[in-house]
Amino acid sequence: MVTSLAFASYGIAGAISGLCAGMFGIGGGLVIVPFLAFYLPLVGIPSVWVMHIAVATSLCIILVNSIAASYAHARQGTVWWWLVRYLLPGALLGALGGAFIAGLLPANVLKGVFAVFVLWIAFYLAFLKGKYGPSRPIEPRWSLSGWSFGIGGFSTLLGMGGGSLMVPFLSMYEMPMRNAVGTAAVCSFIIALSGVMGLILSEFTLPTVANYPGVVGFVFLPAMLMMLVPSILGTFLGAFITVRLPTQILQRIFAGFLVLVGAQMFYSALESILH
């Protein structure tokens, strides 16, 4: 019964995460981590290791999703490669830096700040963008690396894919939403790769989960393998849908998604403070 439920649950969660990666340029961690945090205790993972394994497994799936999303959007012609050249250095360094300082700041503070940020961006995309004058043109300048540095670092601190912040940031400029999604997908790959590298390095400082079947270096292989194919298929479907939806509708959908994420983060931060 548990095995059948696992196959169905992993497949559905993987497909939804891939769809989000393809449509919104996010890595899917906002779907995978909460799902695994809920499901792993049901299959016997010790509670002390649940979040380590959820984040590690999610990062590996995000990495594959980001590769698939980047390829799909590149084929659709939605990636602004000249912009990627300015964003990638900062995103890479920021993600690596965030991995090293993640343990220095209170998690509830980070969650609260992130919640306020995404709720504001959701409000901006849904109601303000384009109504009070044109957006600023985006120019080829290295100062963009500074912004991507912050996005990469903040994303790693929160254990999320970079697209969750990169897409709203790019959409505030004079840039079509579908191009913001495609460009962010490529940057998310670099951020996810940095996260996986940080995970590998963490094995030298954190004990591994010994004697539990299927767990290798904090990665729960059964979940990862069962989620990979549905997530890749969902990624290509999401990219296909993105280029066929009007920009305004895509903005509203993404804004609604951000409201859910921000509300969940705000609730989690409040719960941590109260307890």
Image: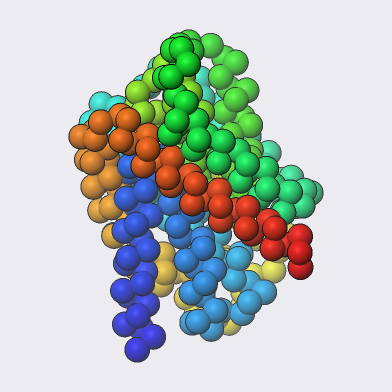
Report x, y in % for residue 95. Answer: 61, 39
Instruction: Using the image as rendered, state which of residue 114 and residue 196 is in the foreground.
Output: 114
Q: Residue at x 76, y 64 (%)?
A: 274
Q: Is residue 13 above or below residue 97?
A: below
Q: Is residue 1 above or below residue 96?
A: below
Report x, y in % for residue 45. Answer: 56, 79
Instruction: Using the image as rendered, state which of residue 84 and residue 35 is in the foreground.
Output: 35
Q: Is residue 203 left or right of residue 226?
A: right
Q: Is residue 59 above or below residue 73?
A: below
Residue 246 picture quarter: top left
Answer whether residue 170 is visible to the viewer in this image. no
Q: Residue at x 37, y 77 (%)?
A: 6
Q: Is residue 201 left or right of residue 39?
A: right
Q: Residue at x 28, y 45 (%)?
A: 238
Most distant residue in the bottom direction: 1
Q: Residue at x 79, y 49 (%)?
A: 104
The type of colouring in the image is rainbow
Answer whether residue 241 is visible to the viewer in this image. yes
Report x, y in % for residue 180. Answer: 39, 28
